[in-house]
Amino acid sequence: AVLQIERHAYLQQSKLLRMCREEGIAVTGFSPLGSSSYVELDMATHSDSVLTEAVVAGIANKHGKSPAQVVLRWGVQTGASVIPKSVKKHRLVENLDIFGFSLTDEDIEQLTTLERGRRFNDPGSFTRSMNSFCPIY
């Protein structure tokens, strides 16, 4: 079984990830880069981006990687598959280049501090414009 959930540094869902691990359920995290896809939908602002966090930039600089590669690596290294969205060839290539390095335990701890419980994809909010209500939690 596979459970697909919104998962990024602002919404880490560690308890759900643990339960899935214990039950043998694979987890795929959508929106692993955070808010990018939601800005154009007015569900987030540019200031909601985990990619601009000083912690992420510092870890990226330390490893010689981009902030996106750091958060994608965090997603995989903490037990989920990730499905980033991009239509730009150079970003697709960059997104695949996350297996040649590992984050340290200290890096993971620093990224854990970014948890905000911030959900961007809430059908309970965006389905209202469709005269519907569909909460996910």
Image (cartoon, rainbow, N blue to C red):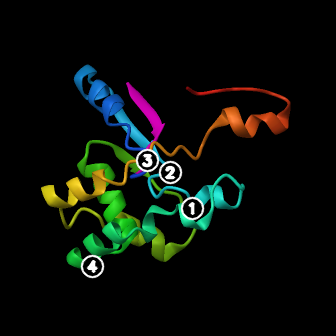
56 versus 134 height, above or below:
below
**Cβ–Cβ under 8 Å for marks 1 and 2:** yes
Neighbours of disc 3 within 10 Å: few (<14), some (14-19), many (20+): few
The number of numbered badges drawn on the structure is 4
| Magenta stretch bounds | 1-8
Report if residue 6 lies within the magenta region.
yes
The nearer-to-camera label among 3 and 1 is 3
Residue 29, how many percent across, how many down?
42, 44
Report if residue 132 lies within the magenta region.
no
**Residue 31 — which label?**
2
Give left or right: position of 77 versus 2: left
> Which residue is the site of mark 3?
116
**First of labels 4, 3 by sequence position:** 4
**First of labels 1, 4 by sequence position:** 1
- Quadrant in the rendering for residue 103: bottom left
| Residue at (46, 58) in percent of width and height | 33
Residue 59, how many percent across, how many down?
26, 70
What is the three-letter code of the residue carrying label 3?
Arg
Neighbours of disc 2 within 10 Å: few (<14), some (14-19), many (20+): many
- Nearest to the observer: residue 28 or residue 53: 53
Indicate the quadrant containing the C terminus: top left, top right, bottom left or bottom right. Answer: top right
Q: What whole-number distance in Å separates the C-alpha atoms at marks 1 and 4? A: 21 Å
Give left or right: position of 27 versus 110: right
Tell me the element at label 1: helix
> Which residue is the site of mark 1?
36
The nearer-to-camera label among 4 and 3 is 3
> Which residue is the site of mark 4?
61
Neighbours of disc 4 within 10 Å: few (<14), some (14-19), many (20+): few
What is the three-letter code of the residue carrying label 1?
Ser
10 versus 106 height, above or below:
above
